[in-house]
Image (cartoon, rainbow, N blue to C red):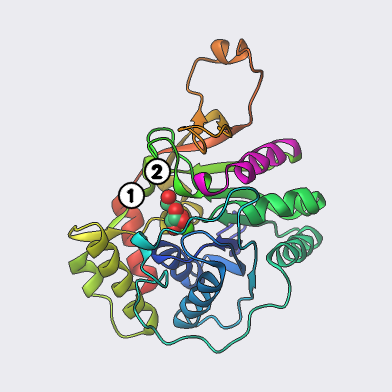
Amino acid sequence: MTDSGRRTPVVLDVDTGLDDACALLLAARHSGLDLKAVTCAGGNVGIDDVVRNTLTVLDAAGRPDVPIARGAAVPLIQPVRPARHVHGADGLGDLDWPRSTRPTDPRHAVELLRDVLRDAAATGELVTLIPLAPLTNIALLLRTYPEAAAGLREIVFMGGSAGVGNATASAEFNIWSDPEAAAIVLAAANDLGISVTMYGLDVFYDVVVTLEQARGLSGSPSAELACKLIEKRSERYQSDGGSIGDGGAVCAVIDPSGLTTERHPVRVELSGGWSRGRTIVDTRTASDQANDVQGPAPVIQVATAVDAKRYADLWLATVR
Ligand code: RIB
Ligand code: CA
């Protein structure tokens, strides 16, 4: 909800997998958000699976009105490397959920983003962009249509880590999949004066819904899908519940006071070695940073802690 009490306009960029689905259900059903569009990128699974899964989830959420556009199938430079071991062969836990019959928006993701942001700039109802996938679409948008930034309130992205990675010891999956795109987004946002918040692995796994809580979700397609998503996440991690993952980034937009952030310079490692895709979060003193031999880096908000119960309760209350 914006300060004026109006719903917050948001756009999600997804590579729908199980936790993107948690985020989509929340964004589609929360009364404080105005979900303007969803754009798809290859990542967890191939772009065709991502598009199909995204349509499926928005149908379950009862939101056939939200346009969905297909975007980048592959990263800017390196080949896409799916994470089917996490999300299942089809990317949605192989649930065999009824598939959507509705078409995607005829525009490419970048053009849909451009048009939504142009409208936002014209009306003054600026959009919060929530990337939850490799940042390929966002990099292409900001480089192809930089003027579209006038329609952005801020970017809150799931990606990166101030600590260890998950795809590799150094790198988080979304950034590891397309490090060049991430570097472009940070640089372009810095140049265009766009506020950026990194919802990284430092908080990503903390918002957990228990199996008992999930099994209390019933009575609607959204609730039943939400339950199955948590059950699949629980199976995958052999635990008594599952994290809503990407869903936490949407919680942070709905209820920012549940997230603790610090402002730090952040760089993305692009070299081809073991640390490629690492987000280097510079926590040194201002003086040391000022004397950095490599010069300044984009300064963004980095999530350091989250009120996990608050966000889990927010998600449960919304998707049921
Ligand atoms: O590293 C976690 C991120 O990678 C999440 O967005 C998950 O959906 C995968 O895309
Ligand atoms: Ca994702």
Give the residue number, with chain letter if any, for mark 2: 201
Q: Amino acid at mark 2?
A: Leu
Which quadrant holds residue 145?
bottom right
Identify the residue at image location x=31%, y=61%. 313
- Using the image as rendered, state which of residue 163 and residue 289 is in the foreground: 163
Amino acid residing under circle 1: Tyr
**Residue 201: % across, % down:** 40, 43
Q: 140 above or below 112?
A: above
Which contiguous range is marked in magenta? 176-191
Q: Is residue 43 left or right of residue 313?
A: right
From this viewpoint, is residue 195 visible?
A: yes
Q: Nearer the viewer, residue 175 or 125?
A: 175
**Per the image, is 188 magenta?**
yes
Ligand 1 neighbours mark 2 (CB distance < 8 Å): yes
Residue density around tag 1, few if under 14, some if 14–19, many if 20 or more, within 10 Å: some
Residue 49 position within the rendered picture, expressed as x and y whole percent measured from the top left? 50, 73
Q: Quadrant of residue 163?
A: top left
Residue at image location 39% in from the left, 63% down from the top = 84
Query: Element type at marker 2?
Result: helix
Q: Quadrant of the N terminus?
A: bottom right
Q: Which mark is residue 205?
A: 1
Answer above or below: position of 261 versus 316: above
Name the residue rendered at 37%, 35% in the picture. 164
Vertical placement of residue 99 versus 226, above or below: below
Q: Secondary structure at mark 1?
A: loop
